[in-house]
Image (cartoon, rainbow, N blue to C red):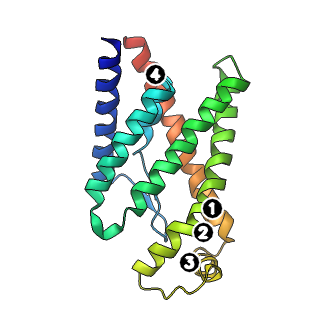
Amino acid sequence: MRNAKVIAFSALMAALSLILQVLPLKVRTPWGMSIDLVAVPIITLYFILGFQASVFGLIVMTIGLFIISGPHTMGIGPIMKFFATLSVILGLKVTEYLVKDKGLLYITMAFLISAIIRDILMIVLNYYFALPLYLKMMGYNITSRTEVIKIVEEMTKTPFWLAIALPNTIQTAVDIFVALPIARKASRLQ
């Protein structure tokens, strides 16, 4: 019975993520990333039900994002959202091994570890995968990876790594610090 409740609640939270995806509650970067609330229900799942439930919810959310985004996007957004959110979940899990008390130290460490994992992964994935495809879809003639860096730096007037890491760090903060009070309130209702 418990597994059925976990699956149902995880699917419900994934559905909430999809609703948040279609709402206009987002800030877009010049290269297509959105700072949004889409992953907040998945991170809330982590705080309420743990690692497995959040990964299940993330998979369901990603499948839904593929359906919503359609074939013209080549799945770039759903793939990037999957790995970005997974990196936050992994950061939370790693922090559990390092900090036993779920107080301020845990949340601070969880944010820092999640942000570091996410920033490194997103810099690599944007460099090798997402940005070359996205910029080509936007009409840029990309012949080398150095052109990707140059285009992003011209768009943002900041170094490539910072242009990717800063919004991803902000998104990590949104994911964790919006999900945490929701999870605490929901846990009190149980």
Q: How many other residues sit within 10 Å of disc 1, few (<14), some (14-19) or many (≥20)?
A: many
Relative to 70, 136 lies left or right: right
Name which of mark 4 and mark 2 comes first in the sequence.
4
Q: Residue at x 46, y 74 (%)?
A: 133
Label 3 vs 1, first from the N-terminus: 1
Location of residue 94 with respect to 29 vertically, above or below: above
- Can residue 41 be seen here? The reply is no
Q: Position of residue 87 (x, y in %)?
A: 57, 44
Query: Distance between the Cα atoms at labels 3 and 1?
Result: 16 Å
- Three-letter amino acid code at the position of disc 4: Ile
The mark nearer the N terminus, 3 or 4, is 4
Q: Which residue is mark 2?
A: 127
Q: Secondary structure at mark 2?
A: helix
Quadrant placement of the C terminus: top left
Per the rendering, the mark at residue 155 is 3
Q: CA distance from mark 3 to mark 4?
A: 39 Å
Mark 1 highlights which residue?
123
Look at label 3 and name its amino acid.
Answer: Met
Q: Nearer the viewer, mark 3 or mark 4?
A: 4
